[in-house]
Image: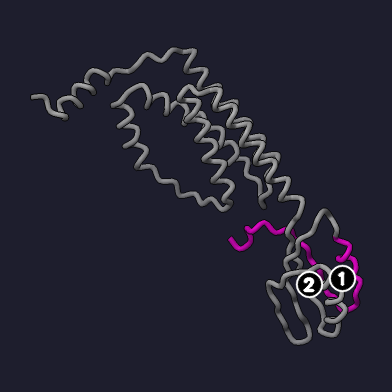
Amino acid sequence: MTSFIDILKKSFLENGQMADLSIPNIMMSLISAFLCSMVIYYIYRKFYRGIVYSSSFNILLVLVSVVTSFIVMTISSNILLSLGMVGALSIVRFRTAVKDPLDVGFLFFSIAVGITSGAGLYIMSFIATLFISLIYILLVQVKTFTKVFLLIVKFENSTNEDVQKILKPLKASLKNKTSIKETTELTLELRLKGDNTAFMTQLTALEGVKSAVLVEYTGDFGE
């Protein structure tokens, strides 16, 4: 009586040989992964809204797509190699910290492109790449319509009433207040549409205001 283990061994022996992957199919998968990843490369560079743009990470997105593509081709062509590949990849540890959650999303985006291209789903890869890119561009444009800023104002206590008159129409949210002797420093969160920063001129024109700094806030400070 043939056991399940015998059937599994027989399947490995019969199907364990490397399948013939034609050069046109290999090139199509790699080219598909490369072209789609170049779309991701352009979208990431053009619409990046973080603190510091990393060209190295953007290049990594392209490499991840192409590498994932030929890994998938290897796995799909041979059962034994697929088991060995899974075992090899399971010991890999990535220790680089990814501060921006969007970077993780782009990394998964590149991996998905490599998987679909390596599996020979070229049309799906192109359509999904364009569709996801359009969604990202749309969301970024909506986000940039209203920007979040941190306003840091340092002034003498005698000027407090005048400062508050200027800040009140802005509907700012107080984040931090520091008082040292006769000086007060306020950190406020503002949501502004466009580049309406005329209030900065009013603040700096006040006699008791020592400094006023406006910084666009993306949620990455202090990391």
| Residue type, numbered disc 1 | Leu
Which residue is rendered at x = 44% and y = 46% of the image? 94
Residue projecting furthest to the bottom = 181
Q: Position of residue 182 (x, y in %)?
A: 78, 86
Corner quadrant of residue 31? top right
Left-right relation of 223 to 78: right
Residue projecting furthest to the left = 1
Magenta-highlighted residues = 197-223
Left-right relation of 164 to 74: right
Tell me the quadrant of the picture where the N terminus can be found: top left
First reached walking from the N terminus: tag 1 or tag 2: 2
Q: Position of residue 218 (x, y in %)?
A: 67, 56
Q: How has the structure been colored for display?
A: one colour
- Is the Cβ of the residue at disc 1 closer than 8 Å to that at disc 2? yes
Q: Residues within 10 Å of mark 2 (few under 14, many from 20)?
A: many
Viewer-closest of 125 and 46: 125
Q: Which residue is mark 2?
A: 153
Which residue is rendered at x = 82% and y = 53% of the image? 194
Left-right relation of 47 to 88: right
Which residue is rendered at x = 75% and y = 76% of the image? 185
> Does residue 162 sit above or below 122 in this rendering?
below
> Does residue 179 sit above or below 25 in this rendering?
below
Q: Position of residue 27 (x, y in %)?
A: 51, 17
Q: Secondary structure at mark 1?
A: helix
221 magenta-colored: yes
25 magenta-colored: no
Q: Residues within 10 Å of mark 1 (few under 14, many from 20)?
A: many
Q: Residue 49: which numbered mark, if any?
A: none
Q: Which residue is mark 1?
A: 203
Residue 67 seen: no
